[in-house]
Image (cartoon, grey):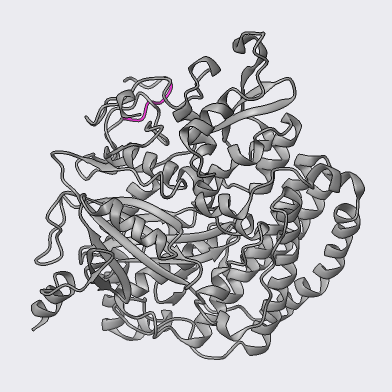
Amino acid sequence: MNDDATLTEHAPAPAPMRYGCPVSESRGQTVIHATRETYIAALKALVDDTFVLCTDLTAVDYSTYVSRAGRPIERFEIVLNLISLERRERIRVRVAVPESDATLASAFDLYPGTEAMEREVYDMFGIAFTGHPDLSRILMPEDWVGHPLRKDYAIGRIPVQFKGSPS
Amino acid sequence: MTDLITATPGATAEGNQEMRARSELTAREVMREIGAVLRMTEAQAAALATDNVDPTEGPEDQTMIINMGPQHPSTHGVLRLMLELQGERVLRCKPIIGYLHTGMEKTGEELTFMQGGTNVTRMDYLSPLNNELVFSMAVEKLLGIDGDIPERAVWMRMLLSELNRMSSHLLFLATNGMDIGAVSMMIYGWREREEVLRFFQKVTGLRMNHNFIRPGGLAADLPAGWRGDVLDILDRLPDRLAEYDVLMTEQPIWRERLQGVGVITAQEAVALGATGPILRSTGVAWDLRRDMPYLRYNDVEFDVIVGSYGDAFDRYAIRLNEIRESMKVVRQILDRMPSGDYRIQDKKITPPPRARIDESMEALIHHFKIFTEGFKVPEGEVYVGIESPRGEIGCYIVSDGSPKPYRIHMRAPSFVNIQCLPHMMRNGLVADAVAVISSVDPVLGEVDR
């Protein structure tokens, strides 16, 4: 019984569509599941439907996610949070990005405010945004190797050097 | 464009973060800086690139790129700005951040939901209680107990959140005064803020980084005599705020320094994702407390302060008056503070009362388990956003059913708001740059996380 409930929550069989994408509910919040192909078209439709404020863009690395039903198919997922100031509504857009080709079209032209956020995702997850005008590391030093928020990037890999200690 | 970098992870080149010299300035670069926000075409942006430059001289001779920060006292920490100057005028500006990056989101994945509060509270260190609040609300939503929080806990959270808004804005007034040259204001602002922090210390035990608002409620009840302490603050502040009006608002030099400086339009602010006082200064009445009410903001009366010019003065005046509105809210909270429990009594989520541990073996076990293992949170993902003093602070949590968040992301208002700086500074004076940074009120701990 319980398994069925989680199954239907994450993968509704005849998914209702909004903005050309399947839509689901997560804890009472509306989530739109776009693919890389429908992503920009869905965002355009959302902008036209008064969702003009993009408050947040981030990513999740699902590579070590252990779960029966909730695990997405691809390794990465980009998550956008949009607000309609007019209707006082929030909506969330999730896009799966495969590990083999970690790229996604940039939302910069529609939401210029995502510039820094996409740079952060690039820096932390190594997902490249095509069409982004200035894709460089934002938080880490620019010659840094690796992407810290990936699950295979271990914590504490760099030994702390103390002055005068034998290294 | 993408030829600068490759899609392979790890391949970056030095110099990418920095501002390009004017000779390398492409239309694409101008589009990034302002064109896209103003919805220009690339040709219009290209024309802008050659603006302000005398064609008889080589562009390199005329303009100068300088660094402001990361160790500049008016950059509120370690913000570094690269400014291209022509004489006194700022032609371009690029903020460079990351000097305070400590990987708090990565750390958050290693801490249990029980410990997470200690981590998030250190992000925006000027409004720690709002950070804790949004984190707790997100965890409670995942647990499905967001409707079961006792009334007293909800009103206590509101009280602390509003007092924190006051202390944060008071500190803004202090630093804003200091940055612009009203140095005495710095002392007054810190003094008043300290009075609020003293109350926090009495309630939570700490001046900052409280970890007091926790999933399920709060860490403790309000101490005896709290009402008198709050009333004391409320009685003392109005006179002080009136003094600020005399010292700053009504002062011609202050107005000269701020009015018309760092102007941003509503369209630009929305495009850039700005929230909080920056968005409100442009005339957009958007305050999550009113527009997407959480806690019991539905039940209290307050006004959303809105500006009309989108300049640094509006942002100053909005914050000053938001202190007054917060005081109004706090008074209503004092009148209506219900009695009851300060946290949900669910032994799986909150520790049992201290006295029970001595009596009951079961309580002792629950206490031990909660502090060693934490509590499990059902699988799912959730985003909660609330109004912090700087704008929308959001918390996005993905849980895989374990006691630790699979991914925790904080939407930091300062991180997004800082993108407004190039627009506010463009064609302004370098002396105003300080006023503009100050009016955005960034907290670098939250920008870099």
Judge whether residue A55 can be spotted in this image: yes
Residue at 48% of width from left, 34% of height from top? B31
Q: Main secondary structure of the magenta part?
A: loop
Q: Is residue A63 above or below residue B218?
A: above
Name the side, left or right, on which B353 lies relative to B365: right
Quarter-of-image position of residue B358: bottom left
Q: Residue at x 57, y 53 (%)?
A: B267
Say if the magenta span includes residue B129.
no
Q: Position of residue B262 (x, y in %)?
A: 69, 43
The x and y percentages for residue B177 are 79, 46
Tell whether B77 sits left or right of B46. right
Residue B292 drawn at (x, y percent): 50, 74
Viewport quadrant of the N terminus of chain B: top left
Nearest the eye: B319 or B259 = B259
Q: Residue at x 27, y 25 (%)?
A: B11
* x, y percent for residue B355: 42, 83
Which residue: 24% across, 43% down? A150
Whether residue B272 is situated above or below residue B92 in the rendered picture:
below
Residue B190 visible within the image: no
Q: Is residue A162 magenta?
A: yes
* Residues in magenta, as a range: A159-163
**Res. B237 image quadrant:** bottom right
